[in-house]
Image: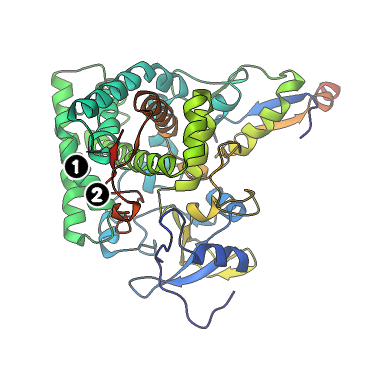
Amino acid sequence: MTPPDCPVFPFKREDPFSPPPQYALARADGAVCPVSLWNGKRAWLVTRQAEIRELLSDDKRFSGAMADPNFPTVTAARVAVDKNERAFVGMNNPEHDRYRRLFTREFSVRRMQALKPKIAAIAESLIDEMERAGPPVDLVAMLAVKFPSLVMSELFGSPYEDHPFIIRCAVARHGLTQSAGEAETKARELADYVLRLIQAKEANPGDDMVSRIIVEHVHTGHLTREEFAEIGAMILRAGHDTTTNMIGMGTLLLLEHDDLRAQLAAEPELVEAAVEELLRFVSPVQFSPRRVALEDVEVGGVQIPKGEGLFMLLASANRDEAVFERPDQLDFARDASHHLTFGYGIHQCLGQMLARYELHILFNTLLRRLPGLRLAVPLKQIRFKHDMQIYGVHNLPVAW
Amino acid sequence: MSTARVKVSVDTHRCVGAGQCVRTVPEVFDQRESDGIVLLLEELPPAQLTPYLQKAVRLCPAGAIALQDAADYEAAT
């Protein structure tokens, strides 16, 4: 596809439950689509699942180094944080694997399974709080934000009362409207916060990730405190904002689909398939992963010059007609587990099993405890996160 | 999908510990306690697991799982 003028990216959504309509048009036209960015640079949207999987598996021809000046961005603020990215999310191999492997066992399936009783107790206690407050309540404020914060506090060791600060830091990175200075300051503040937490845990260890990593990797010389602080900041941001948005959007979708909600309430064991389908359908991460072509490359028959940036549109891959039948239909009967919501390749989400178990427990507990759950306002009063790089809802007033 | 018995191999250097294989076929895959990297429990699983093993190959983000026909493997060894 060679349009006379490149459209400006990002695009606007028309339907709050679907990605921008340009994605489907681009998929029909070809695997990649050229766009113009805020800074006038050209970048390429990769829209189909097959090519996204191929590119994210190809470390030879595509770089994921965020500090690369050619790394494509959707805002000036993103440039400011990308150039300072020191965590493995922004590294290529072999550096990436060296650091990621220090943290993989903390997120293993077995470790995450062991956390389930605590996750379940957190879900119950937050719904107790909602009941005490009485309807209507904002489910985003009372559940979607607090639930992952309490889980991360338990796992990571960050005091729960610090979560509003952590969330402000995450939002300063994930927004589309903040200034570069604001994004850079909040990135610094969060890394400094984790550094202080590391120092506090060295003096007074607990049963948490920070304390374990100190003993296993900092005191053995595998990881400096400063490196750990940058990685810890990434883990905190990722652990808070993404899950919050899946809970908000996932609950809204359940409320908008009476049949699916009834099906899941009647058959709680359906929750694994339901969560995979909700992950596919919502695809909260909008403008990542990104890559830079390290040489002139051909993708889906289109020549991409060395040094140009590419956006892997996960939300588009998750609506790819070649992979999912009736992709715009939310359907708990399908096996959606090959969605790309957690990315693909070496950078695929480290916390994905935690996210899955959080969502399984949260949705089942919510439907069991509050079977009469409903929206307390008309849908048009729900504010969708058109202003964020991680999509979701800002508010979700509910009654029961 | 094929239901022929397969020989499973894993590449611990490529593995990134995402846990997709453990989630999909816990009878065959686990993660090392030391570093969360893949641990193969069963090289020649029963044929009824083959479709799930094929799914694990597709879900593995790092291309760290390979399957070959068990009969070919046994003939060659």
| SS assignment at label 1 | helix
Q: Chain of mark 2?
A: A
Q: Is residue A10 left or right of residue A212?
A: right
The image position of residue A220, as x and y in percent, is 30, 23
The image position of residue A86, as x and y in percent, is 30, 46
- Residue projecting furthest to the right: B75
The image position of residue A88, as x and y in percent, is 37, 42
Q: Chain of mark 1?
A: A
Name the image quarter holding the C terminus of chain A. top left
Disc 1 crowd rating (10 Å Cα; few below 14, some 14-19, many 20+) is: many
Q: Is residue A162 above or below residue A298?
A: above
Kindly indicate the quadrant of the structure image that contains residue A286: bottom left
Kindly indicate the quadrant of the structure image that contains residue B72: top right
Q: Which residue is mark 2?
A: A171
Q: Give me the residue at 45% from left, 43% from top.
A: A347
Q: Earlier in the sequence, mark 1 or mark 2?
A: 2
Between residue A316 and residue A368, name the one nearer to us: A368
Q: Is residue A202 left or right of residue A143?
A: left
Question: Given the image, on which type of amino acid does mark 1 rest?
Answer: Leu
Q: Are the residues tagged 1 and 2 within 8 Å (C-beta)?
A: no
Between residue A87 and residue B57, name the one nearer to us: B57
Mark seen at residue A190: 1
Name the image quarter holding the N terminus of chain A. bottom right
Kindly indicate the quadrant of the structure image that contains residue A357: top left
Q: Give me the residue at 35% from left, 50% from top.
A: A390
Q: Are marks 1 and 2 on the same chain?
A: yes
The image position of residue A129, as x and y in percent, is 21, 26
Mark seen at residue A45: none
Q: Is residue A30 visible?
A: no
Q: Is residue A149 visible?
A: yes
Disc 2 crowd rating (10 Å Cα; few below 14, some 14-19, many 20+) is: many
